[in-house]
Each structure stands twice: as C-alpha cells, then as structure tokens.
Image (cartoon, helix red, strand yellow):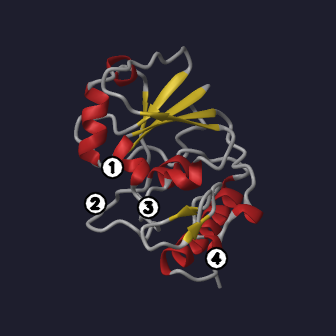
C-alpha cells in the first residue's frame, strides 16, 4: 500500500483529517471563525496519540501547530495570551464564563500534552510562562478518548472552544460534536451514523 497512510490495525487513514477513511471528516471541514490566531505547542508524544484533539484543531487555518523541542525557545509577542491555569497546579480554575470577551487577545497560545508534559514544557519555555494567562471555568468534558481524565479536565480542543464566547460559539460547539461523531466512528472502524 505505497503512498497510503495506514494505522496500526492496517486500516487506511485520510491524510488530511487523519481519521480512518471510512469515517473521513474532510467533507465537513469548515472554519472555527476564531477572533484571534491560535498557536498550539504540542508535545511530540501527543502528536503520535490517536486520541489527540490536535487532529481536530489542526484542520483550521487559524491554528498554527508547533512541535515542542526542549532546546528551542519560543518568542511570544505583545498581545499574546496563554490558555493555562493561573496557578502552578494544573487543576481547572474557575473564572468568569466569558473569558475572551474582556481580554484583548491577538494570539492565544495553548499547550497540548498530558498535565505532566505541559508542566515540563512550560518550565522550559520561560517567555511563554510569563505571558498573561487565561483560565476557563470548570465544565464537563465530552471528549471520549482519554482514560483516567481529571475531573473538570478538558481536551485541548474543548479548552480552546471554552475560551471563546461570541456569536459563533454555538456553531463551534456543534461542529466539534460532529467531529467527535466521526472520530468515534473512526476509532470503531465504521462510518459515522
């Protein structure tokens, strides 16, 4: 099967959405219409996990993916904000429910990986660690792929969606639900219902 992307089970995967071809999401892809640019710093191990919500986020042209390298320092700019709890403890922090409305965000940075991985990533990125932080209110996760997820812990995609409250929020949430239906079908090897 030269030139075809296959998963560990030997089933063909779409090169664009990375879901199994039987549940390909590409015909449904549309913009998230975010009010700012998103920079996602992903741990290299997270990019290899089939349960990573980065697969959903990287479909949007407003999301710039960076692979974390311990020796490479990132240089954020004025107007950049980090979506990460304001304390050193990576437990969800309750803040207002419209976090991005009162903040003038030019670019939003997110870290993607386990809590342990993101804590280490942040420790190795001092300029990123000094950015103003945006925290989101606790909410239940709809992401079905992670075992032993913390209470109130969200996938990276859910955290991004929770950080924006504007007239397009409901559309983003239904789009995400549509993606999850395809992702669950892909994981189970069948077309979405």
User: Which residue in the structure is indicated by mark 2?
Assistant: 150
Asked which secondary structure carries label 4, the reply is helix
Cβ atoms at labels 2 and 4 below 8 Å apart: no
Dot 3, how many residues are within 10 Å of its Cα: few (below 14), some (14-19), or many (20+)? some
Q: Residue at x 27, y 42 (%)?
A: 117
Q: Residue at x 42, y 68 (%)?
A: 8
Asked which secondary structure carries label 1, the reply is loop
User: Which residue in the structure is indicated by mark 3?
Assistant: 50
**Residue 160, image x and y in percent?**
53, 47
Dot 2, how many residues are within 10 Å of its Cα: few (below 14), some (14-19), or many (20+)? few
Cβ atoms at labels 1 and 4 below 8 Å apart: no
3 or 2: mark nearer the eye: 3
N-terminal label among 4 and 3: 4
Cβ atoms at labels 1 and 2 below 8 Å apart: yes
86 to 92, vertically: above or below? above
2 or 4: mark nearer the eye: 4
Q: Residue at x 33, y 49 (%)?
A: 92
**Residue 15, image x and y in percent?**
63, 56
Please give the label number shown on residue 92.
1
Dot 4, how many residues are within 10 Å of its Cα: few (below 14), some (14-19), or many (20+)? some
User: Which residue in the structure is indicated by mark 4?
Assistant: 22
Q: Is residue 105 visible?
A: no
* Separation of residues labelled 1 and 2 (CA atoms): 9 Å
């Amino acid at each position: 099967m030269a030139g075809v992307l296959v998963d560990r089970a030997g089933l063909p995967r779409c090169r664009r959405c990375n879901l199994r071809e039987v549940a390909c999401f590409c015909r449904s892809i549309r913009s998230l219409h975010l009010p700012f640019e998103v920079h996602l710093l992903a741990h290299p191990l997270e990019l290899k996990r089939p349960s990573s919500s980065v697969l959903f986020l990287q479909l949007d042209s407003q999301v710039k993916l960076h692979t974390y390298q311990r020796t490479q320092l990132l240089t954020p700019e004025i107007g950049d904000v980090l979506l990460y709890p304001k304390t050193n403890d990576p437990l969800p922090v309750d803040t207002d429910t419209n976090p991005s409305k009162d903040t003038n965000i030019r670019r939003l940075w997110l870290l993607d990986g386990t809590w342990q991985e993101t804590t280490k990533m942040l420790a190795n990125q001092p300029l990123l660690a000094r950015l103003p932080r945006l925290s989101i209110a606790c909410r239940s996760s709809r992401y079905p792929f992670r075992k032993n997820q913390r209470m109130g812990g969200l996938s990276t995609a859910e955290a991004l969606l929770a950080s924006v409250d504007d007239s397009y929020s409901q559309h983003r949430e239904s789009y995400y639900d549509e993606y999850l239906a395809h992702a669950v079908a892909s994981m189970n090897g069948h077309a979405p219902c």
